[in-house]
Amino acid sequence: MSLDAERLVSAVRVLTRAGHLAGPDDLPSLITAAAMSLGADRGVLYVVDYDQVLLVPLGEGSGSGSLPVEGTLAGRTYTTLTQQRSGAGAEGATIWSPVLDGTERLGVLELAFADPDELDEAMREAVLDVAALVAELVVTRSVYGDAIERARRRVPMTTPAELQWRLLPALTFVGPRAAIAGGLLPTSSIAGDSFDYALNSNVLHVTIVDAMGHGLEATLLAAVAISALRNARRSGLDLRAMVGAADTQIAEHFGPDKFVTATVAELDTSTGEWTWTTCGHPPALLVRGGKVVKTLDQVVEPPLGLGLVGTCPRVHTERLQPGDRILLYSDGVVEARDAEGEFFGTERLVDLVARQAAAGLPAAETLRRLNLAVVAHQEGALQDDATTVMVEWLVDEPDRSTPSIAGA
């Protein structure tokens, strides 16, 4: 066994064996021990904040400060998922590796080596493996305490937002034939917007909802809508019956003056057939070849909860081409106003999405940049919830959404 392989085995043993009894507060010391097993002098895990603008070191004793995603090597690692290296010669070298739960970006792992010659290709591959195991520990240990959650929050989170974030699936999923990414704004006070998805065999189920009102009641409305749709889907109902069930549940529990707008859809990942119904929600956009080529606005049903959708809402289909993207969004995206009252608008949304698609960015990074643009348009003070979901079919997303070594 080579020296690099021996060190990797040692680092993995540190993380797996000590990890059995570790809580989230123990992760910084575990990562330091694993880093030293690899031959590094220092190891720091940076977790991304909810707004995805800062990488925050985990552990008060790390000796490191937060790093902006924009304009840093750590940020480049996070946005491109490509391992980066800095330093050489007598001052040593530092390696930055992406930390992902599957394809959801959690942060970046920094390892500093006194001897830059240690960082040969085999060692860099070993660091990727350690970063993957660190990601598993971040996810599993976070359910036992609040250290990771506290690090990710720049401002206190409201109770509605706390509930809404706990209802969400992972923000990103990438498989061999389809990818999906979503985002919520404002992250610390989101209330009535939400989304959901599930991949069952060759069918990707996708939902985006926007509940009327603000605060806790809007969150409860959205939670019932998402839960009713999930329950119907898991009971084996088809898309029409799922929508009808959610309409009935909201009407029965909240009365006739409360409603939820939604788009409920399915993607057949084997054929590229996109099937959907829109219930009072902004129509989705079809992005092809870096351009928005169609607005999927055939027929809009009434919102859920008014008892008007019935058991047979109209369902529409669109045959996608390889590489096509579907963008779903709530009205808070296009209705975001700047200080002069100018809307963010559909035209600005279409232009931004088209430019990012043409740049070949992964869906998750496209949405991160879209969210930054929406926040900047409102100078950081959003007046309404803004949610985006992007679905992509038959693409090179797996290659763009998994870790790699720069230059490899």
Image (cartoon, helix red, strand yellow):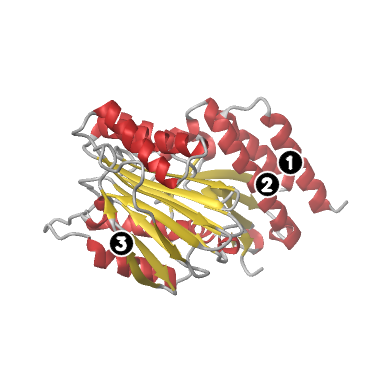
Q: Residues within 10 Å of mark 1 (few under 14, many from 20)?
A: many
- Quick check: 124 left or right of 354? right
Q: Nearer the viewer, mark 3 or mark 2?
A: 3
Q: Nearer the viewer, residue 151 or 399?
A: 399
Q: Earlier in the sequence, mark 2 or mark 1?
A: 1
Q: Residues within 10 Å of mark 3 (few under 14, many from 20)?
A: few
Q: Which residue is identified by label 3?
A: 298
- Assign a secondary structure to mark 3: loop
Please give the name of the residue rendered at 51% of the width and 41% of the height, measured from the top-left corner. Answer: 63
Q: Which residue is identified by label 1?
A: 12
The amino acid at mark 1 is Val
Mark number displayed over residue 341: none
Please give the name of the residue rendered at 73% of the width and 62% of the height, measured from the top-left corner. Answer: 121
Q: Nearer the viewer, residue 25 or 140?
A: 140
From what the image shows, is residue 216 above or below residue 355? above
Q: Nearer the viewer, residue 25 or 105?
A: 105
